Image: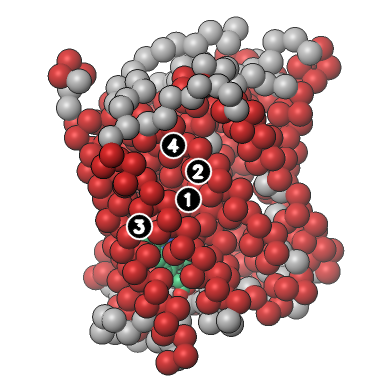
Amino acid sequence: MNMQNEMPAVGAVKVYAAISGVVILLMMLFGLVMRMTQGQILPIEPNVFYQLMTAHGIGMVAIAGLGGSAVMWHFLGKYVNLRAGFAWANLAFFLTGVVLVLGGIFLGGFAAAWTFLYPLPANGMGMWGKHAAAAYMGGVLLVGVGMLLFYLESARAIIRKYGSFAKALGWHFLKSGQDAPPATVIASTVVTIINIIAILIGAVILTMMLINLYVPEIAIHPLLAKNLIFLFGHVFINSTIYMAVIAVYEILPKYTGRPWNVYKPFVWAWSATCLMVLTVYPHHLLMDYAQPLWMHIMGQIVSYTSSLPVLALTLTATLGSIYRSNIKWDLTSALLVLSIFGWSAGVIPAVIDGTIAVNQVMHNTLWVPGHFHLYLLLGCVTMILAFTNWIANKEQAAGFSGLEKAMLWVFAISAFAYALMFLLSGQASVPRRWAVHLPEWLAYSQVASLFAAGVVISAMAIIVRAMGGIIRPARQA
Ligand code: HEM
């Protein structure tokens, strides 16, 4: 039942990985420009800063989604029969959506941040018009439609092979202890379920806001809009790491020689995450006094528990599988292990911010970008880089040159220090999303810019090297 179909990465997966590498680099450059602007190293106008911030936010979220999809599609395809046409259709929607989003931002001047919070997109106050807002929101909607097709095809293939989501989640194994599905299938099923729900909710609010743009009489309840937007956005960005972590489950065993076995706690953890991921987003609304009290309380409790089960098991299983395993170190295996550290460390500031008393003072500061840059840059993006490097090496362990070791260390140290500077800025009450910083905050942004440059240079070296391997035909490898 769980037979693995060992195929090298082909077609869509390679294209996904290559596009992810290039876009991650471009968005990192946008990020560097923003941080240098905040440090008054670059003279960028505030309206351009907010355009870059919008492009960087939505671009990074979308590309983490595409990179994570590459990992999931590649490994899930070894267990179930996925039809490649859906991966290409997703890509076509993605690219068309991106063109619209970029047009809305850089031609139309849209700069309402990636979260497009109602009613801001319809109130550009002369900085952008409604067509620019429509292009942005229509573009995001198209990206969502493509992703929905991708998950519907995953759902079809999973149900066809395993009979039901319940079986693919391993619930029968909890009772009988027999025939556990592979870790990849369990993780993919969870992501498929949560993202189908999240994307449908995102499509509803985007459509409502598009209608409201042109027919303002049809107004939306702002708190309802915020809830729908955050449910969609938070689940989608959370799911990127739940897809990317499949790279750890599938690739690390090739280096340690120890299979990633599924035990009952693993099944429990993923099923619990499936529920909690959908209910954790209210920790972004703890400052909304009109939100029902029970949702605030749920937001705090679920923030403490949401990512812990899967993370704790993945962390202990990673450490357990490395310990005395004679693991072969190369760039891929080192990035994979680093990513588990980044994910684990990134959760700590999130849990702190999810505490209502702390949230009241910290949420609108750079503490929050500190948390998500730590777990997305050192966790999710690092997993995607490891996967890209793995397929660039034709899915084989490789040598570990001095240059690669240097690239890895510069990346790890700069990324950690960069995120730490966001956290320190937050701790010093530097507000989030301000293009112009007060003189007493400049040092934070300037030191952070130095580390950001380190991230960009080392990531560029890793990505450019991997691109060579991806483009090179297999017979020349
Ligand atoms: C070299 C690496 C990076 C740099 C220099 C960078 C820089 C920045 C800066 C300066 C901000 C604005 C912070 C503020 O004042 O609120 C920001 C926001 C953001 N970044 Fe990054 N970033 C990097 C990597 C990433 C990665 C890897 C991701 C996700 C995969 C990411 C996702 C975001 C998001 C979602 C926002 C929020 C935008 C908003 O508030 O609307 N960034 N980044």
Ligand 1's quadrant is bottom left
Pick whichever of labels 1 and 2 is earlier in the sequence.
2
In screen coordinates, is 103 left or right of 253?
left
Which label lies toward us, 2 or 4?
4
- The residue identified by callout 3 is 455
User: Residue 397 or 375: which is nearer the viewer?
Assistant: 397
Residue at the bottom extreme, as displayed: 439
Q: CA distance from mark 3 to mark 4?
A: 16 Å
User: Residue 164 or 72: which is nearer the viewer?
Assistant: 72
Is residue 148 visible to us here?
A: no
Q: Amino acid at mark 2?
A: Ser
Asked if the beta carbon under badge 4 is closer than 8 A to the nearest atom of ligand 1, the reply is: no
In screen coordinates, is 327 left or right of 465?
right
**Picture quadrant where residue 135 is located:** bottom left
Q: Amino acid at mark 1?
A: Leu
Q: CA distance from mark 2 to mark 4?
A: 9 Å
